[in-house]
Amino acid sequence: MRKMSLFLAAGLIAGCMTVPAFAESETEAGKTWVIATDTVFKPFEYTDADGNFVGIDVDLVAAIAEDQGFSYEMKSLGWDASIAACQAKQADAMIAGASITDERKESGWTFSDGYYTATQSMTVQKGSDIKSFDDLKGKNVGVKTGTQGAAYAESLKDEYGFTITSFEDSPTMYQAVLGGQVVACFEDTPIMASSIKDGDLNLEIVEGSENEGSPYGFAIFSDDSKELLDMFNAGLADIKADGTYNEIIAKYLGEDAVPTEEESEGVTEAATEAATEAVTE
């Protein structure tokens, strides 16, 4: 997989991919943190029509870095490669719409406070005979490797009698549904909704197929990155307080997607408890 590095200080990436610039140089800010991410997880991280690397996660990190005064380099590696880079200490942290789960905590992830809560759902071709999980018996569905959507499908497959095929990225998985290689796929609801709308895909989310959902978190895999995690949490609280967070969510998902104060507090409390447990376990 080709690796692309986003140099935030200069606002440029090799291959002319640009991102919002951050003013402080490495010399001025001290350490430059390496943050790994994905490129095909719209609207959280993706490239726009002009080749710019954009998305909710990209904007959140930029805003938090400016608030906290740290420098960073964002590397677009893909989901699996981002995890591997963090585990190998080739990256300091990861942000890629990663759901906070007990399984991940037990395998070495340490999460920030939650910054957005997403459900997972099932998507099929428009006009499909698949109207519910009951219609999946004897059929094959698609998932993206290592994601919460994959975990959701795994939790249902024995009960409803379907098999699973794994894919490395979302676009390939969607094309498999469109091409008939699988009858449905499971992924995070806002990702699928955005992809279907913006790509004008002949797909639809099955009503009532969503789970309860869980918050997304910024993740580290080593105590060496604890300082970065603390800055992320502090910066996240600040940009929520000054309205920047709501502006970012509304920019990509619309005003209706901006969480209420009660919803935001609930996510933060749950994620903080999860992160604390991860550190103390």
Image (cartoon, helix red, strand yellow):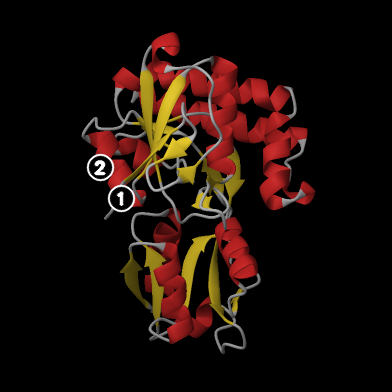
Question: Residues under labels 2 and 1: Cα distance?
Answer: 6 Å
Say which amino acid is labelled 1: Asp
Q: Under tag 1, what secondary structure? A: helix
Residue 129 shows in the view: yes
Q: Residues within 10 Å of mark 2 (few under 14, many from 20)?
A: some
Q: Which residue occupies the extreme front position in the image?
A: 16
Residue 211 shows in the view: no
Q: Residue 91: x and y, percent?
A: 30, 32
Q: Residue 266: x and y, percent?
A: 66, 34
Identify the disc placed on residue 8: none
Q: Is residue 64 above or below residue 1?
A: above
At horizontal 37% and vertical 21% (from top left) the residue drawn is 32
Q: Which residue is mark 2?
A: 84
How many tags in the picture?
Answer: 2
Q: Which residue is mark 1?
A: 80
Q: Under tag 2, what secondary structure? A: helix
Q: Residue 221: x and y, percent?
A: 31, 30
Q: Which residue occupies the extreme left position in the image?
A: 88
Q: Quadrant of the C terminus?
A: top left
Say which amino acid is labelled 2: Ala
In this rendered view, identify the residue nearer to me: 30 or 255: 30
Q: Is residue 180 above or below residue 266?
A: below
Q: Residue 173: x and y, percent?
A: 41, 71
Q: Is residue 68 left or right of residue 244?
A: left
Q: Quadrant of the N terminus?
A: bottom left
